[in-house]
Image (tube, rainbow, N blue to C red):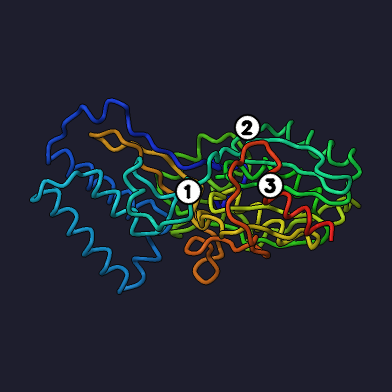
């Protein structure tokens, strides 16, 4: 999210209530929700200050905001749809209004053409030399205990090669993949840190997190007049006391559904593991630069807004959200027919590459 763990590594949220379709809202209610959503953007969204500081971008935003509000007020446009288009203008998959943002977002590859796309957690030997761990979520299913057991099972196998398949991993908490990072670590690495936008709403959100370092950040926010306060140092170090002799070669298998903490796992391993190569056909989703989300409901429709509180120090020059993260090696195969807990065609192909 960056994402610094364990600070609120939350996934995307769509809070549209099932009964919503049966409720009619007045133009005035839609306008009130629109104005509320705009205030959240301008007051709290971590991505807004960069827009406000760029005259050309700020003018484009103001024009779109005025146009959309007029469409709601004078043309009967659905207010949620208008907010969705406004939020999508920022190109940030973490910034959302229910499901209304989706139609206007940058399109990324999908896997609807596959017979079954439902990656499931599994670990097993593929050949005498290569072991697979499929890790499709950082949300806690599979659990951290499962993650640790998968590492133990791999080491017990004696296989010199390891594939960690994170296709479909849309994020959650960075803590969930920590055992894999430690297993694959072979050199000291450095990552860009993050800073939080210093607002009363964010202070209130973080005050409820009973973690010492979060409370220290809250204290700094309360005493600082700066618009952003560091969540971490400018660069964060990855360092362990030892290096596991296995695996000798490793692959991290990605797709366009990999987002948020899943993408952070890619960056972490690139920073600290020379023996790990990234394989995939598509870039990751691009949902990482602005994160640590706060959820708030619109006052009338009660649909949920997702507002990223922090921004990565990668910005503005080295962000990943506009393009996603590219694999080191593009897999030259069509999509597999099925991805569940099976050994699919892509896994077999990567196995062949590792065993060359």
The picture places residue 110, in percent across and down from the top left corner, at 48, 50
Circle 1 SS class: helix
Instruction: Tell me the residue at 37%/59% (across/down).
Output: 90
Residue 197 drawn at (x, y percent): 45, 54
Assign the C terminus to one quadrant of the image. bottom right
Q: Residue furthest left?
A: 74
The reply to whether the C-beta atoms of the residues labelled 3 and 2 are less than 8 Å apart is no
Q: Is residue 34 left or right of residue 262?
A: left
Vertical order, 300 against 65 (above or below): above
Which residue is located at x 33 percent, y 54 percent?
A: 104
Mark 2 — residue? Answer: 141
Q: Position of residue 99 (x, y in %)?
A: 35, 42
Q: Are marks 1 and 2 in contact (CB under 8 Å)?
A: no
Pick the residue in front: 259 or 301. 259
Ranked by sequence position, the earlier of labels 1 and 3 is 3
| Callout 1 touching callout 3 (CB < 8 Å) | no
Of labels 1 and 2, the one closer to you = 2
Give the secondary structure at mark 2.
loop
Q: Nearer the viewer, residue 221 or 244?
A: 244
Badge 1: residue crowd in 10 Å (few <14, some 14–19, many ≥20): few
Residue 165 got which mark? Answer: 3
Identify the residue shown where x is 67% and y is 65%. 328
Q: Residue at x 66, y 61 (%)?
A: 191
Q: Is residue 336 left or right of residue 246?
A: left
- Disc 3 crowd, CA 10 A, few/some/many (<14, 14-19, 20+): many
Q: Which mark is residue 282?
A: none
Which label sits on residue 222?
1
Where disc 3 sits, the SS reads strand
Distance from Cα at disc 1 to Cα at disc 2: 36 Å
């Amino acid at each position: 999210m960056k994402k610094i763990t364990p600070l609120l590594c939350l996934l995307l949220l769509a809070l549209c209530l099932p009964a919503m379709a049966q409720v009619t809202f007045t133009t005035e209610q839609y306008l009130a929700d629109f104005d509320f959503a705009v205030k959240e953007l301008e007051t709290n969204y971590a991505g807004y200050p960069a827009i406000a500081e760029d005259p050309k971008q700020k003018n484009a935003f103001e024009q779109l905001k005025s146009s959309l509000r007029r469409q709601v007020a004078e043309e009967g446009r659905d207010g949620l749809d208008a907010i969705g288009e406004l939020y999508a203008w920022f190109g940030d998959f973490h910034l959302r209004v229910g499901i209304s943002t989706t139609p206007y977002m940058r399109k990324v590859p999908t896997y609807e053409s596959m017979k079954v796309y439902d990656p499931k957690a599994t670990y097993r030997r593929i050949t005498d030399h290569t072991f697979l761990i499929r890790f499709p979520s950082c949300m806690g299913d599979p659990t951290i205990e499962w993650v640790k057991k998968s590492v133990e099972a791999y080491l017990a196998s004696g296989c010199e090669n390891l594939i960690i398949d994170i296709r479909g991993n849309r994020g959650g908490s960075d803590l969930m993949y920590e055992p894999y990072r430690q297993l694959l670590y072979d050199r000291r690495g450095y990552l860009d840190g993050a800073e939080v936008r210093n607002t009363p709403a964010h202070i209130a959100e973080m005050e409820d997190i009973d973690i010492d370092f979060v409370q220290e950040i809250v204290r700094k926010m309360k005493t600082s007049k700066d618009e952003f306060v560091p969540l971490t140092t400018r660069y964060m170090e990855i360092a362990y006391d030892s290096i596991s002799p296995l695996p000798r070669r490793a692959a991290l298998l990605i797709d366009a559904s990999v987002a948020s903490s899943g993408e952070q796992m890619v960056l972490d391993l690139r920073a600290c593991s020379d023996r790990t190569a990234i394989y995939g056909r598509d870039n990751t989703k691009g949902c990482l630069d602005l994160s640590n989300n706060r959820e708030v409901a619109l006052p009338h429709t009660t649909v949920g807004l997702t507002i990223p509180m922090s921004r990565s120090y990668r910005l503005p020059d080295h962000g990943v959200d506009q393009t996603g993260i590219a694999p080191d090696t593009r897999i030259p195969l069509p999509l597999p027919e099925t991805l569940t807990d099976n050994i699919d065609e892509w896994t077999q192909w990567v196995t062949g590459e590792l065993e060359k």
